[in-house]
Amino acid sequence: MFQAKTDKKAAIFMAPGCEEIEALTVVDILFRAGIPLTKVSITDSLSVTSSHDVTFLTDEVIDSFSFEGYDMLILPGGMPGTANLGACGALTDQVSAFAKAGKYVAAICAAPSVLAALGLLKGRRAACNPSVEQKLLDGGADLVREPVCVDGNLITSRAMGTAIPFALAITEALLDKETADALRANILYDPEA
């Protein structure tokens, strides 16, 4: 059973066509870390079907979700999930507000392109999927090709294969390096192996 180890809260936004591994890896790691995480559908249905036809349930729908009291917003990638996230004004308005207020925003794979389109990556280091690199460059980002990039309150990552280090970076940001390192060891995640 889940046991909260912090009063910090995160929300992850699920869109039809999202990349399920990027989303659910974050859910799993944050659950293990004891970080309260709300899964939010950007549609009026709690049920979300991913880009690979995996259907899962979220906790809330965006129309009834209150962003107040949250410390981080998380955007998984995938197509057309990323395009759907970018077209959701209720979400993009809050992503901009969070980033500008210095609160954490995390995005993986194609989803950093949503941040670029909002003007949030201008002069900031960011990673993304190769398929959207030009969108980040057009948005003024300093593109890096590291698995995960942390630039202040923005955490970005490259793809499904970097979902674990992405989730561990989120854990470190919301809790601490020791907790992230303990989780890394517990799940036997060693990128050098």
Image (cartoon, rainbow, N blue to C red):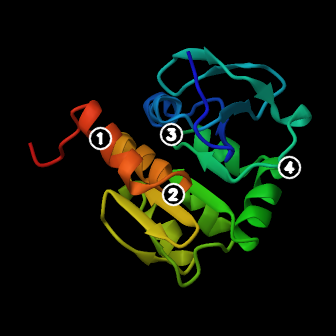
Labelled pair 4, 2 in contact (Cβ < 8 Å): no
Query: Could you tell me which secondary element the residue under label 1 belongs to?
Result: helix
- Residue 163 image label: none
Label 2 packing within 10 angstroms: few (<14), some (14-19), many (20+): some
Mark 2 / mark 1, whichever is N-terminal:
2
Please tell me which residue lies in front, 22 or 37. Answer: 37
Q: Is residue 150 visible?
A: yes
Mark 1 / mark 4, whichever is N-terminal:
4
Would you name the residue on which mark 1 appears? 184
Q: Is residue 186 above or below residue 89?
A: above
Return the residue found at the far left: 193
**Amino acid type indicated by mark 1:** Arg
Picture coordinates of residue 185 (x, y %)? 24, 38
Mark 3 / mark 2, whichever is N-terminal:
3
Picture coordinates of residue 23 (x, y %)? 52, 34
Mark 3 / mark 1, whichever is N-terminal:
3
**Amino acid type indicated by mark 4:** Glu
Residue shown at 64% from the left, 35% from the top: 37
**Amino acid type indicated by mark 2:** Ala
Would you name the residue on which mark 3 appears? 78
**Whole-number angstrom distance, CA of label 4 to CA of label 2:** 19 Å
Q: Quadrant of the N terminus?
A: top right
Q: Is residue 161 visible?
A: no
**Whole-number angstrom distance, CA of label 3 to CA of label 1:** 25 Å
Which mark lies nearer to you, 3 or 1?
1
Mark 4 / mark 2, whichever is N-terminal:
4
**Whole-number angstrom distance, CA of label 3 to CA of label 4:** 27 Å
**Amino acid type indicated by mark 3:** Gly
Would you name the residue on which mark 2 appears? 173
Residue shown at 52% from the left, 44% from the top: 77
Query: Could you tell me which secondary element the residue under label 4 belongs to?
Result: loop
